Image (spheres, helix red, strand yellow):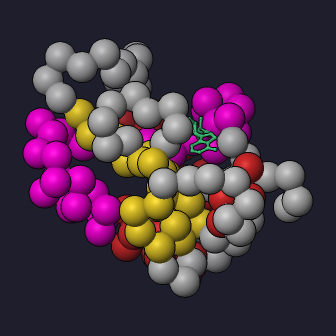
Amino acid sequence: MDDCVFCRIVRGEIPSTRVWEDDLTVAFMDIGSVNPGHLLVATKAHAENLYGLDDGTAAAVMRSVARVGRAVQSALSPDGLSLYQANGAAAGQTVFHFHVHVLPRWKGDAMDLVWPVRNPGRQELEETAARIRAAL
Ligand code: AMP
Ligand code: ZN
């Protein structure tokens, strides 16, 4: 992916502030940080989103997320830590190369996520779960 911004970061063609890397993943500071310590864990190989990850890469991503998350907690002592990961423009994805946001949180910070609880009935939960199980 010649012009993918995160592929270019992986190849070292544009600057990034890296904190961690292994064979399959790289973690670097988010240039549009919401809070201090906001970083991204991205795959080294280009995959547009979650649906393009093989099992080994998916596992490696979570291993790196946990590792840098523990380091952020130890280094910065935030009040909390949010993980955020978007697939598709409708979900808010703006860079179409798979990545997970590791976002330190402090009480009263300006970060917000609208979560409109709908409380569907058990029947709807069962019907939706059956459709998902059938696709596994
Ligand atoms: P998303 O909306 O989940 O696709 O998030 C993309 C993130 O990538 C945003 O938070 C951007 O600030 C961040 N970003 C875009 N370009 C760069 C870059 N060159 N270096 C570091 N972070 C970047
Ligand atoms: Zn890419």
State whether residue 13 appears in this view: yes
Residue 91, magenta (yes or no): yes
Residue 20, magenta (yes or no): no
Kindly identify the residue that appears in the image at 18 percent across and 29 percent down: 106
Residue 113: x and y in percent read: 39, 22
Kindly identify the residue that appears in the image at 69 percent across and 54 percent down: 14
State whether residue 132 appears in this view: no
**Residue 91: quadrant of the picture:** top right
92 with respect to 106 (left or right): right
Residue 71: x and y in percent read: 22, 61
**Residue 119: quadrant of the picture:** top left
- Which quadrant of the rendered structure holds the C terminus? bottom right
- For residue 56, above or below residue 5: below
83 with respect to 93 (left or right): left
Residue 75: x and y in percent read: 16, 54
- Which quadrant of the rendered structure holds the N terminus? bottom right
97 with respect to 67 (left or right): right
- For residue 125, above or below residue 72: above
Kindly identify the residue that appears in the image at 41 percent across and 69 percent down: 20
**Residue 77: quadrant of the picture:** top left
Residue 46: x and y in percent read: 74, 65
How many tags in the picture? 0
11 with respect to 118 (left or right): right
- For residue 132, above or below residue 25: above
Residue bounds of the magenta highlight? 66-94
- Residue farthest along the right direction in this orientation: 2
